[in-house]
């Protein structure tokens, strides 16, 4: 079920902690005591690492009424109490407050169009108040969808300064998630640390194969029969962040590098928008550089 | 995680009932009170039908020790109590007692081999004490794997009598699940009612397309670009039972009917063994002729 | 290799006829004698029907120079001679003259956007001089891409008259291919006969399953685990025309009808644009209501 | 259409050479002059490398009659003449003489079973006169299918000697193709050179990702969402030979390494048997460490 199908009285709780008996009961009971009704619950125990992961989507009628702020505070306090007891990391997201997303692009438009069209059709539950680029090229697309477009030309010398300006802008705009929709610049460690697990990048190969530059050229050279794309959280280690989603398509000797680029566009945009959607629906937890993805 | 990776102290609970607040908490709390630790929990609410479905896999150390019978009885009593309170339909399956499966075949061997090889390699957590056929052809396969092979020649006249003998045999052998691995006879309503939601059939098309006989001929005639297979619970309405699993492969104008038959074999055996595995791991609930499948 | 990667000296020949020895040699020799160099040749013999199908892509340097009209005429005369000898049906398409495509739409925009974006990025080798609709809704999309948008409101009474106007417009615009990109009107036999094997429709199910209206509702009702889309040439028999391309995606009990509609959009647009591309690259032959598709 | 559907009067010609005008016509004409009827022809030009590749399947009634040896010699002489004119590399394979295949295994049986079952059901057009292993474990499987089983225990010291014995045995048995069906030994350069482009290996990852040992452990560690398998011709560079076929399946955080191993078995056996089948049907040409695969 898609996020936007839920009423504004819905909230989603993500939890991770060391595993121990009684966790499911403790959370369910605490929410029930607050009058919340659990709509969906998905849980995973990593028995090797001894870790517990859970996603709970619940409904609380008071989240829409006059006392909605009090209700939200009350729920948060409840989760904080249970969380403290079990040393949980937790994230509580209220449907009423859609996340704010900034899209970073360079000159390629297929991922940008895909995100904007899905957003317009209601598939992505978020606001998109900002598109950032290091080039002017895609301004017309941004204008077409009425999204502010900010250009920060980057070169080796000004990079540190520019990133500071970008971070300031993102903070000013209260951005929750940065989507690198074929943004052809490597973000510094300072930048990625500021938005840890909140920057999604699309790499145009099935990582770890063909990490680095020109993956379609590498793929053609090696003569693979599959090409793919990988969406992952950006970290300071390029192409090494936690993988969220991957997909591939079959290719043959008939495809030139240009064909791989063309065919790859379809996989890139599909994989990226799936990853963004999973994040917006609070379905992803990260542990030990890997993701737990509670699929919809 | 596969069923056989769990120790014998593991059990799985399947529940369906009308939705109401507090169900998750009630079940989790009841199990916790009995000393059970929840390993995996997956839940689905059909908000349109107002139905609640849950699968809980849990561990109770006492299920292996000297008091294991008492422990099992205690857990069952607990579930019965909660179940009665909420008018639940429920099934509790203990890992220690693998299900007993009978495979029905005619002359085609690919699905039979696939099930027997997967069973031998430990993929299917069950016992296979019996293979039933209306022909002698596959006896050598059964012997190769040391499984008793019983032949019941069927014709229009003796069908009712033969089915009664088969049902008696299945009951004598305490069979929990019947797998129709390309068994080319239609079971009567009497038979399917005896084993409701406990007979899995494989149909060699992506139902509802090409229901009935000779689906590959129908597919070739229509010129489709996909062929598929469907595993479903057998009901008295032929090819109309609840669908468990489906898959397809791409085909082209180059494939003759014989090629479709050959290519289809791969899909049939994969889809059938996936469905059997889902059933053996207590992942399937049926409601309104549709399945809720808690994927692994 | 995509059509637009070829220089303007390239042409493609599609041939179908009764099979007999010497066909490959006759065509290859005739083209060679004219100075043409075969780039790709793909051939299929339907041994059951006794039919021969071939696609030949070749290069003739003279197709670009001052004598290009003479060269094209000369090639056409050559093919006509061989064609007459073997009673061939044949189509010769010169890369220099891209086909002219009209897109028919109603209110849904995802297929339209997909086609326009792929066209703009150079994936579809054609001109799009016209978008036709029975509603005003998608005019802004057409304007955004600078394509003339013509509205013909249709109702039961005016249908015959309107279709005549539409056919006149298509002929005036020298339209080679009509793409029904979720156009929610059934074309009459008169219309489909005017553009035989030149109208591509997208149906939102894996035909022949769920033919007719509201296929996603039908799919949800039946509880299938796959949904799909089918691109086919439109004929007077609704949903019964020759299938060009099909694809599916996996779904589960979690998806509501609204989710199926959303997920289906991705398959619909992919399948439709693949079919349009195959047609534009002269890769499709029709025989006995089935297609021979020489994949790229 | 599968190889074994063709009568014994069928032959297949594979050709590669530098591209130049007239190649298709020259081959087609030469075969036509010999009375051969072309059933299928597939051609590929690598315009970047300037290379021409073709596969022609044809029928010559005389290949079955009393003069069949003379007919085969005549056809071979014809191809030799054309081949010499254009400096072609070519391979002519007569359907009447199925290839002889040796399967190499260690202790894992799923690929072996898959090949033997497909062979028995007529899917693989070849003879399997020999299974070679470095362990006794799979002797019962070989016996079950009546195939001679030869064990050569290998260690670091005796490797060179053992390989010489193996090569001698393969030559004595007139083996055309060696299939490494999860054979856990690395073949020396001497061995691979003896059977250049005639040894098919299955690697249990989507190469080039996770080359080397324990690929499922590597995949789990990296947290990929896809696992795969790669069939390639073995060369002295481990895991670097020309890729014939690849496939993947989706996995999630729920799968342990043991689950990946289990799920991977399905992909491995499918990919390996597809590759073997492609080779047996003379559909593969190698150029510059990449394959041209004329799909069926």
Image (spheres, coloured by chain):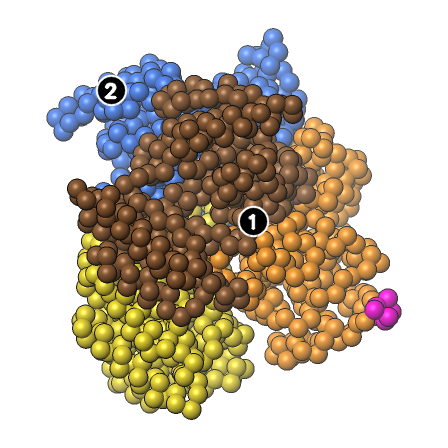
Chain colours: A orange, B blue, C yellow, D brown
Judging depth in this view, the residue of A41 and D255 nearest the camera is: D255
Report x, y in % for residue C260: 46, 56
Residue D57: x %, y % from top left: 31, 53
- Tell me the residue that label 2 is attached to: B151
Relative placement, left or right, of A166 versus C252 is right
Query: In the rendered structure, are the residues bearing label 2 and label 1 in contact, judged by CB atoms less than 8 Å apart?
Result: no
Viewer-side label of 2, 1: 2
Residue at 56% in and 69% down: A117
Q: Secondary structure at mark 1?
A: loop
Q: Is residue A46 left or right of residue D43?
A: right
In this rendering, the answer to whether D178 lies above or below C242 is above
Q: Chain of mark 2?
A: B
Q: Whole-percent x and y of residue A142? A: 65, 76
- Return the residue at label 1: A296
Q: Nearer the viewer, residue A251 or B148?
A: A251
Q: Residue at x 72, y 50 (%)?
A: A240
Residue at the left extreme of this rendering: B157
Residue B181 in the image: state x and y as whole percent.
Answer: 33, 31
Closer to us: A129 or D174: D174
Q: Which residues are magenta?
A: A156-161
């Amino acid at each position: 079920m898609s996020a936007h199908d839920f009423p504004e009285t819905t909230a989603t709780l993500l939890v991770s902690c060391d595993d121990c008996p009684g966790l499911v009961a403790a959370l369910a009971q605490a929410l029930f005591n607050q009058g919340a009704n659990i709509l969906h619950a998905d849980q995973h125990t990593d028995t090797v690492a001894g870790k517990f992961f859970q996603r709970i989507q619940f409904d609380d009628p008071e989240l829409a009424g006059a006392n909605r702020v009090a209700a939200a505070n009350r729920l948060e306090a409840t989760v904080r109490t249970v969380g403290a007891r079990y040393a949980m990391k937790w994230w509580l997201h209220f449907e009423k407050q859609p996340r704010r997303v900034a899209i970073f692009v360079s000159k390629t438009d297929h991922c940008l169009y895909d995100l904007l069209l899905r957003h317009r059709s209601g598939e992505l539950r978020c606001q998109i108040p900002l598109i950032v680029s290091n080039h002017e090229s895609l301004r017309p697309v941004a204008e077409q969808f009425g999204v502010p477009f900010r250009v920060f030309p980057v070169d080796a010398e000004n990079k540190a300064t520019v990133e500071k300006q970008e971070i300031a802008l993102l903070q000013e705009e209260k951005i929750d998630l940065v989507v690198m929709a074929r943004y052809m610049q490597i973000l510094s460690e300072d930048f990625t640390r500021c938005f840890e697990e909140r920057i999604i990048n699309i790499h145009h190969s099935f990582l770890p194969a063909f990490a680095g530059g020109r993956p379609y050229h590498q793929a053609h050279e090696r003569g693979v029969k599959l090409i793919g794309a990988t969406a992952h959280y950006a970290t300071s280690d390029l192409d090494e962040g936690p993988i969220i989603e991957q997909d591939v398509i079959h290719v043959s000797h008939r495809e030139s590098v240009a064909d791989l680029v063309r065919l790859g566009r379809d996989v890139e945009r599909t994989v990226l928008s799936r990853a963004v959607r999973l994040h917006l629906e609070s379905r992803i937890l990260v542990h030990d550089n890997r993701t737990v993805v509670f699929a919809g």
